């Protein structure tokens, strides 16, 4: 499955290109990934160095389990691994014929991890990525879809396997939260697992639109964000999800927690939401240039975000944001 014949091209303006995810590696290093296999490293968030990647596929997500070992995933069902802090990468898995992107990846330790993506893609490794096996999680199907697949399997097994390839929703984001793993995606999907996704408990539907990120707050509550400015909050005692007012209809991409307790939600059209009360209420802080903020981390007392025009450093002062 692996194919290392195409390497990324070192581009002078890579840090201003479309970037889709960023990882904060133990507050020591930032790693950003994006279009055409671009991988960028920085020790300060201001100065960036592109490294060669063994792919030109668009990379959608990056995750580090420790200071040295990390993975990136993307289009062509590509999975890359580094063992030296992002300086060098190798292809662990690639399946361009599938024509489905992977959208996120998470590990609970250096050996056990899962990658998720479009149309319910779900790949698991138990050996650090030397081998990846596909799983089909029918617990995310509606009952009528389960019945349809069961009937189709009896009538036409080939059609059954074809249908399985596209019947599940997109899995947009997978989040490790201690012993619990959360998954969010299309058609209001929110689920949690206590065994790294071998089995899932699906939350009752609270919204039919897609969700793109979920995070536990400083006080231990949960917030989830998605399409059309939708943000929901659930208290740690297991209370139902409650919609929060955001005063925006922008797509919300990424939740960032600051060191001192604030919550920021980054979105399209330059939208930044700020909460100072653990996600209960939000102030709208639009970015002047209106560019979409796709993902971000808290690093050196500021947000370092990736966007469709590259890296953005965003600092707070008493009146709002400095860029």
Image (tube, rainbow, N blue to C red):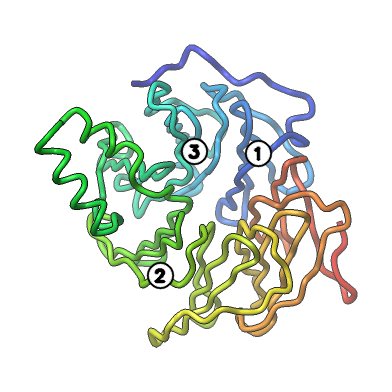
Give the quadrant of the C terminus: bottom right
- On the image, the x and y values in percent for residue 222 come to 49, 75
Label 1–label 3 contact, CB within 8 A: no
Q: As drawn, which residue projects farthest toward the left?
A: 154
Residue found 32% across the figure and 41% down from its top: 123
Q: Is residue 104 left or right of residue 179?
A: right
Quarter where residue 263 is shown = bottom right
Instruction: Give the distance between the C-alpha atoms of the residues marked 1 and 3, in whole angstroms.
Output: 13 Å
Return the x and y of residue 277 as percentages of the image width and height: 65, 85
In the displayed structure image, the side of residue 280 where residue 127 appears, left or right: left
Is residue 196 visible to us here?
no
Q: In front: mark 2 or mark 1?
A: 2
User: Which residue occupies 86% across, 70% down?
Assistant: 320
Q: Is residue 289 left or right of residue 274?
A: right
Residue under pointer 3: 72
Nearest to the eye among marks 1 and 3: give it. Answer: 3
Q: Residue furthest toward the top? A: 5
Q: Is residue 232 visible?
A: yes
Residue 41 - label = 1
Kind of element beneath mark 2 = loop
The answer to which of marks 1 and 3 sits earlier in the sequence is: 1
Q: Is residue 1 above or below residue 281?
A: above
Measured along the vertical axis of the image, is residue 130 above or below residue 63?
A: above
Place of residue 282 in the rendered image (x, y in percent of width and height, measured from the top left): 70, 78
| Cα separation between marks 2 and 1 | 39 Å
The answer to which image quadrant residue 196 occupies is bottom left
Q: Residue at x 74, y 48 (%)?
A: 45
Question: In the figure, 106 relative to 199: above or below?
Answer: above
The residue that disc 2 covers is: 205
Q: Quadrant of the N terminus?
A: top left
Earlier in the chain: of badge 2 and badge 1, it is 1
Q: Quadrant of residue 161?
A: top left
């Amino acid at each position: 499955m692996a194919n290392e014949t195409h390497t990324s091209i070192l581009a002078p303006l890579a840090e201003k290109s479309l970037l889709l995810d960023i990882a904060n590696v133990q507050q020591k290093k930032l790693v950003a990934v994006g279009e055409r296999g671009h991988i960028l490293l920085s020790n300060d968030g201001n100065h960036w160095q592109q490294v060669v990647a063994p792919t030109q596929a668009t990379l959608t997500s990056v995750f580090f389990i420790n200071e040295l070992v990390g993975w990136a995933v993307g289009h062509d069902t590509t999975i890359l691994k580094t063992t030296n802090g992002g300086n060098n990468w190798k292809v662990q898995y690639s399946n361009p014929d599938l024509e489905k992107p992977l959208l996120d990846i998470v590990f609970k330790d250096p050996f056990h991890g899962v990658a998720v993506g479009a149309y319910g893609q779900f790949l698991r490794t138990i050996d650090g990525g030397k081998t990846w096996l596909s799983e089909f999680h029918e617990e995310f199907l509606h009952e009528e879809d389960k019945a349809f697949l069961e009937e189709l399997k009896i009538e036409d097994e080939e059609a059954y396997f074809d249908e399985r390839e596209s019947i599940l929703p997109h899995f947009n984001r997978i989040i490790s939260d201690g012993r619990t793993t959360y998954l969010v995606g299309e058609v209001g999907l929110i689920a949690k697992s206590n065994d790294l996704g071998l089995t899932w408990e699906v939350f009752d539907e609270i919204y039919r639109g897609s969700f793109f990120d979920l995070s536990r707050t400083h006080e231990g509550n949960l917030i989830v964000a998605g399409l059309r400015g939708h943000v929901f909050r659930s208290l740690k005692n297991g209370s139902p999800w409650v919609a929060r007012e955001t005063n925006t209809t922008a797509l919300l991409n990424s939740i960032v927690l600051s060191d001192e307790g604030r919550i920021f939600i980054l979105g399209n059209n330059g939208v930044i939401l700020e909460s100072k009360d653990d996600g209960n209420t939000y102030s709208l802080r639009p970015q002047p240039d209106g560019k979409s903020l796709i993902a971000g981390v808290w690093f050196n007392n500021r947000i370092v975000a990736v966007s469709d025009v590259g890296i953005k450093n965003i600092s707070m002062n008493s009146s709002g944001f400095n860029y």
